[in-house]
Amino acid sequence: MGSRRRFRLLALLSLTATGASCYAVDFAGNARARSSVFGIAAADYFPLASGWKWTYSVWKDGVKIPVLHEVLARQGDVAVVQEGGERITYVVTPEGIAEKNGERIGDYIIKNPVKVGAEWAVEGGRARIFAVDGRFLSARVGHHEGCVLIAVTRNDPTRITQTMFAPHLGPVTISIQAADGKEFLTLAQAVLVGVTRPDGAPSTPASSQTGR
């Protein structure tokens, strides 16, 4: 098993790194149905204007490294993001934010309506919103409320990717798990430890920021 830690599927999501923590409800869906941040849509949870940069502390195979994500270009509804060694194109639609594969719209990473229990199909599985009232606490990034937790479950092999999005900030935690009998093995984790906002970008309502 090495240094990989086991987590049960119904366990409370808890990621800690460099002084940051994130928590929400369990996978039974026990969460308040309304977000603590009102009047925002799915696209507001992942700002994709040129100039946004996010630095993550990524743990994988027992090693922790910093990884930079950066919006390289934005033309209309299409944004190109360099995520570590991978370049991904996203498209913003009235439904939310999806990956763009050539001329085809791929999987949505977040989608309206933003409410507990909302689901949509992804390639090889389903995505579901499990919480809309999560909190992200970080000495470097600040205190963010009204975070949305989305779990994407795929089959062959069974694996789960959990992503927490903070309003007007983007993904703040990511956890990738794979089935190992009745339990799940955590393969990788990422926690946001730094952010650069373009001029004029809004901060999360009801949050404190510690700087750009």
Image (cartoon, rainbow, N blue to C red):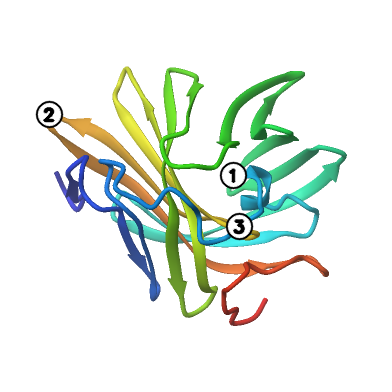
Residue kind at label 3, given as amino acid type: Phe
Q: Residue at x 83, y 45 (%)?
A: 74
Of the residues tagged 1 and 3, which is closer to the observer? 3
Q: Is residue 174 above or below residue 198?
A: above
Q: What residue type is labelled 1?
A: Gly
Looking at the picture, how far across and down is residue 194, in whole percent?
A: 57, 69
The C terminus sits in image quarter: bottom right
Q: Mark 2 or mark 1: which comes first in sequence? A: 1
Quadrant housing residue 125: top left
> Considering the numbered disc 2 on the image, is that residue within a helix, a strand or a loop?
loop
Q: Nearer the viewer, mark 2 or mark 1?
A: 2
Location of residue 206 with respect to 72 vertically, above or below:
below
Q: Name the residue under label 2.
A: 181
Q: How far apart are marks 1 and 3 (CA)?
A: 35 Å
How many other residues sit within 10 Å of disc 2, few (<14), some (14-19) or many (≥20)?
Answer: few
Q: Which residue in the protein does label 3 denote?
A: 38
x, y percent for residue 209: 60, 78
Labelled disc at residue 85: 1
- Quadrant of residue 23 in the image? bottom left
| Residue 1 position within the rendered picture, expressed as x and y whole percent measured from the top left | 14, 44
Q: Do the residues labelled 2 and 1 touch (CB within 8 Å)?
A: no
Q: Is mark 1 on a helix, strand or loop?
A: loop
Residue at horizontal 43 percent and vertical 34 percent from the top: 128
Which residue appears farthest toward the right when viewing the image?
76
Q: Are marks 3 and 2 in contact (CB under 8 Å)?
A: no
User: Residue drawn 42% across and 24% down?
Assistant: 126
Question: Residue sitting at 62 percent across and 23 percent down?
Answer: 106
Name the mark nearer the viewer: 3 or 2: 3
Q: Residue 119 carries which label?
A: none
In-image side of 122 versus 7 (left or right): right
